[in-house]
Image: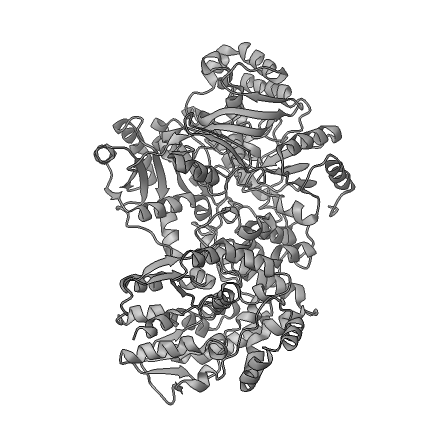
Amino acid sequence: MPRVTAVALDLAAELRSRGISGVDDSVLARALYSSDASLYRVVPQVVVKPHHTDELIAVHEASRALGVPVTLRGAGTSIAGNAVGSGIVVDTRLLNRVLDIDPEAGTARVEPGLVHADLQRAAAPYGLRFGPDPSTHPRCTIGGMIGNNACGSRALGYGRTVDNVEALRVVWGSGEVASYGSRPAAGDAATGLLALADANLAHLRTEFGRFGRQVSGYSLEHLLPEKGRRIDRFLAGTEGTLATVLEATVRLVRDEPGRLLLVLGYPTMHEAADAVPALLAAAPGRLIACEGIDARIVDLVRARGGAVPELPRGGGWLMAEVAGADALDLVERLRVAGGALDTRLITDTAAAATLWRIREDGAGLAGRSLPTPAYSGWEDAAVPPEHLGAWLRDFDEILAGHGLQGVPYGHFGDGCIHCRIDFPFEPGDPASAQVFRDFMTACATKLRDYGGSLSGEHGDGRVRSELLPLMYDDHSIALFGAAKAVGDPDGLMNPGNIVAPASITDDLRPVRPRASVRSALRLVHDDGDLGAAVHRCTGVGKCVAPHTSGVMCPSYLATGDEKDATRGRARVLQEALDGSLVRGLSDPAVGEALDLCLACKGCASDCPTGIDMATYKSEALHQRYSGRRRPRSHYLLGRLPFWARLGAPFARITNLLMRLAPLAWLAKRVAGIDQRRSVPLFAPVTLRRSAATGSLASATPDVWVWADSFTDHFFTRSAHAAIRYLEAQGLTVRVISEKACCGLTWITTGQLDQARSIMERTVRTLAPYVASGVPVIGLEPSCLATLRSDSVELSALPEARAVADGMLTFAELVTRLDLPVPDLSGVDIVAQPHCHQHAVLGWAADQRLLERAGARVTKVSGCCGLAGNFGVEEGHYEVSVAVAETHLLPAVRSQPDAVVLADGMSCRVQLDDLAQVPTMHLAELFASRL
């Protein structure tokens, strides 16, 4: 495939000539938007990011003028493949304004690219909320929800998106611009559609709208007289195949107080499904949500070190939510009616939020809960709830009959099941998709027995549209075609979906050829296969949420650009390995996508599919520069511990010289450091020269302290404070005398051969200390995290695993030895956990100690923005500052008198550079209170 076709150039020029902004036909953009969250890969000719809704109209004009298809997308979280297209792909996320909120009418008027969670934030001051809330609510857009008729967990109580649409302004595929609502509709498209309905009233009344989650196909029932002949609601769920939303007015509902969550445990998911009708009958119209979740999903969260509240006994659970003044009475009725093995009422709001977060991450978690990768495809079928248990048993029989496994979860109260399935796709073997086709067909055929719907909320897309004739009769299929002819006579709007469908096995991403890379890293979670590692990303897009309480993805939070999100980077790496668009890991598109990756490892813990972009970036840099000249910063900043060790005898002189502006300017210029950055001061005397040291041959202390390179050469005070505190508790402490660098800076710059040599020397040094039974602690979280995670990625030495498992943080040591903590009553603390601490080590032990000490703790989300060499390098300063402004700097400004706790050197340097704020390591804080 040509990298940029002549047609694409002409198309881009045509779009720009019409005043459309954000037109991008680069290899990078086309790679980023070649996939959504589905199984499908379709490379667009051009990507457009309009800034005004008038530009959407202009896009349609250009589409018709050149005969090029147009596909709309919001956050790109479509699991059905209805947000990819071969022509113009339009990213609407810059059309994100709340135009008006009318608290009296209970409505909001919004642009289509507004993120669901941002609408909730705007409505909350009025005590209102938008009812439907898909699991992707932190990033999905209102336009996308309308396109798919999205529902989510609380649609049981608040209705589907269609039930909450009050008016739409749209541009049809024909070019007609019109507004629709509860008033009689006018215009050519409305006239044609209403005439179609009038000619088929009996058929529409018997075949459409039979139950709430009948989302597949076009919802023609909304054109009936008794339904108000609502064109706006008919358009909900048409998947961008007829019209594009320019503006939407949606209903808001009162956010009921007294929300309670009852969790009911059952032996299996089958029994959980059987209980649903009884629960619905016990609280008719009062259940806000009734969700099902399989124990295997929860087990995966536990295995990854995630927090899981105590749950009742069972192999599967129902999560029933109610609200109102009589909520406790409702809970008791549900408990009695549910017939569960065990139940638990979740009264703690934090625990409830954790359970909902696990449920929301279900798609990503389920994809990794089986021995082999599990895929979407048949993940959205719905049946009337009274048939759910029987359908789930039949579904499991069909799975077994095809040699497949799946992990079910979903909106059980609505009869809608989600499931990720281990289809045996093989890279480079299109024939391996036959099991997928056979299974999909068998399920669709069996679903007819229950009067079910192929889609319950995700839409039909490429993955189900071909199967619609198994759900609907010929007359219904013909009506879909007739409606398409009215709204989109040229067939340019999102072709291949619903009408004239693409084959479900065309354009499948998992069967594309995949280049084999001899990786320097072991990639232990993916059997050494870089292709399998980057294909962990399924596109669910947790990393593209504009607001987050975690770390992932700091660069996206700063720029809002898809290329700077974990998903975007994964897509480009996928294309580099198995696509014809991006030509290998040395392609400039790969470099551009990875440039602003901070290697923070936030995705390693926050991404539900387990993406570790820091590791992939290291491997990509290693491959790119193998045998080639590297950037200057790799030789200097990337080997900082080496230079620090050489310069240690001259530390005082070096610090004095760096205070001279001309010399500091020259040093930064040579090292590739941004001139706006300070040069960190070296410790006048290294830790190993200023503290009591020892070796296994000379000492047997109570605690060993590992002198990592940053603590040894820069922040010695952290270790001295730890020693003072521990000695005050009567412990003997010694610093390990041998040199032992973790190689972090070599790893982050992709110098992996040298990193392996350094790491193996270090783990051989430290392993006997760990094996001695005396606790060994590390003070710098990034270095300790490198030992815990990267050591086993670099080396197969058994010592690597022993060291990874055996090293402790300061907080873990204090906890293990149950040492007394100082009285911090009344002390306000703003704590910035290092990103690697968040992702690899965990900060729970630190938080428990601070709370035990009586401190008032504000834990800062997100990354500090420095991230080792990233934030000091030329070209990264603005993004580094923007990252700091997302969470850290506002938190520090909001509490000017608080103690600022930051264990990591990067965080401390960033705060000193940008806020001139003094910081303390946890050990320093404890030692200061002796």
Residue 23 vertical placement versus 236 (above, below): below
- Point out residue 593 in the picture as x, y percentages from the top left corner: 62, 54
**Is 438 on the left or on the right of 576, as rendered?**
left
Between residue 865 and residue 533, name the one nearer to us: 865
**Image quarter of residue 778:** bottom left
- Point out residue 296 in the picture as x, y percentages from the top left corner: 37, 48
**Image quarter of residue 893:** bottom left
Residue 171 vertical placement versus 347 (above, below): above
Between residue 799 and residue 729, name the one nearer to us: 729
Between residue 845 and residue 210, name the one nearer to us: 845
Q: How many numbered discs, if any?
A: 0
**Is 683 on the left or on the right of 188, as rendered?**
left
> Which residue is the extreme one toward the bottom?
698
- Point out residue 488 in the picture as x, y percentages from the top left corner: 64, 23
- Point out residue 899 in the picture as x, y percentages from the top left corner: 38, 65
Residue 94 showing in the rendered view:
yes
Q: Quadrant of the C terminus?
A: bottom left
Between residue 92 and residue 703, name the one nearer to us: 92
**Image quarter of residue 823:** bottom left
Residue 455 showing in the rendered view:
no
Residue 531 vertical placement versus 647 (above, below): above
**Is 820 on the left or on the right of 871, as rendered?**
left
